[in-house]
Amino acid sequence: MTDQLLDRSPFLRGPYAPVHEEITAYDLPVTGNLPPELDGRYLRNGPNPLGLEDPGHWFLGAGMVHGVRLRDGRAEWYRNRWVRSRRVAESLGEQWPAGPVHAGMDFAANTHVIAHAGRTLATVEAGALPYELTPELDTVGPCDFDGTLPGGYAAHTKADRWTGDLHAVAYFWGWDHVQHVVIGPDGRVSDTTDVPVADGPMMHDFALTERYVVLFDLPVTFSMEAATAGSQLPYAWNPAHPPRVGLLPRTGPAREVRWFDVDPCWVFHPLTAYDAGDRVVVDLCRYEGTYDMRVLAEQGPLTLDRWTVDPAAGRVSQQRLDDHPQEFPRVDERVVSRPHRYGYSAALGEVSRDTVRPNGDFGDDVFAAALLKHDLSTGTREVHRFGRDAAAGEAVFAPAGPDAAEDDGYVLAFVHDPDRGAADLVVLAAQDFTADPVAVVHLPVRVPLGFHGSWVPDR
């Protein structure tokens, strides 16, 4: 039965395969020299099914957060911990920490891990609440921001360093709207705005500018047919749902969204966005045409594009920035909502000097063996390769200091080392991206390929 299960699900084998133990390891070995300015925690979330049960989809495994604590040029510890939803706690023979639950949805948040207002939060989409963790990654319990959150929450957030606010766009199949939620610097909800939408669209992510919340209302919507058939991820391509991008003003007496048509496509993640005079520029990873949420693989073409929304003309123009398949785009978090020059992403498929294997995507043993750095000012790209059998996760930028230049810092990622059968935390110098890593922290175990993470500095 176990062999049949492994043969059936690509997300239970290879670099996706779950680990079965929680580990705490101290004083990790390091090749190279860890920059002393890296003082904090590198955290990453992802699905890690309990046991070998097949969750049916990569997005549905119980969340496990992995973390490495860096200080004074040392890697003090590595920890991995399941997020203790009720089901996970009971499966581990523990008492659930208890707390609020939205609409009966209690899920071991598996998508992102962030820090805001003194809390470490594991997040997930579709209306379930985030879970608060201790700095050592133990579960505190579900979080509704001290009772101020009126409904569900979201996987992705955007922090505005100029205001100290944390923004999110929540969706839930039972709503006739999506909800823009603002968490203030005090960790409580300061504002919510409901935006009417039809068909229950999946809004996995959004973008933020100084003036607008940018919404992606695209044709992956709630499917009652899939739900009735027992799907735990009842969202499907809906050709009757018009694709559009919306601009919701962040302030003002009349916060009504304005919508603009786009060609049929799917977007999981924007790189970031900013205001350019009266127009709005959005850089994003775009899957052209239909997107089948059930299979994940062989979608696309998948490209890095730029949308320029022109409210005066009432249209969106599209520019191709990079035609190589890539996902998990990230910027220096300090430039979120403002003009940016640099971006980082994971190249999907095999990478040679000039090409990336076409049709690279999630699943079916296709994964990132390289990270990309984009200079959007010059239109150039650098590639850092890890080797054919390596598997790299999302790249996260850590600035060298609070006032450092946009690419003055380090790029952090978990990379599977096939020779050791374990993971490394690789630290690249952003300004010397193709060079050997400045440091490699050798973890004692594998870190399964997962989703999103954060650099959480102590200062």
Image (cartoon, rainbow, N blue to C red):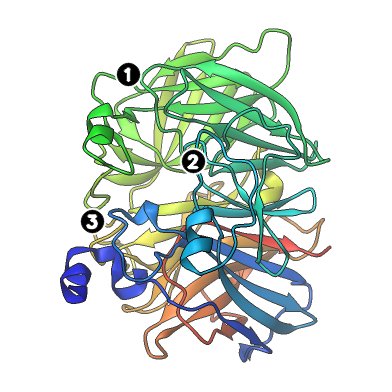
The residue under label 2 is: 105
Query: Is residue 339 placed above or below 46 in the rendered structure?
Result: above
Please state the total of marks drawn on the protein image: 3
Query: Is residue 132 placed above or below 232 in the rendered structure?
Result: below
Near mark 1 (Cα within 10 A), the count class, few <14, some 14-19 or many ≥20, is some
The alpha-carbon separation of the residues under discs 1 and 2 comes to 29 Å
Could you tell me residue 214's position as x and y percent?
Answer: 55, 28
**Can I make out residue 382 in this image?**
no
Q: Please tell me which of labels 2 and 3 falls first in the chain.
A: 2
Q: Residue at x 79, y 48 (%)?
A: 117
- Residue type at mark 3 is Pro
Q: Secondary structure at mark 2?
A: loop
Could you tell me residue 381's position as x and y percent?
Answer: 46, 58
The alpha-carbon separation of the residues under discs 1 and 3 comes to 28 Å
Q: Residue at x 27, y 27 (%)?
A: 224
Q: Which sits in the foreground, 100 or 330?
A: 100
Which residue occupies the extreme top position in the image?
A: 254
- Residue type at mark 2 is Met
Mark number for residue 242?
A: 1
Mark number for residue 358?
A: 3
Q: Please tell me which of labels 1 and 2 falls first in the chain.
A: 2
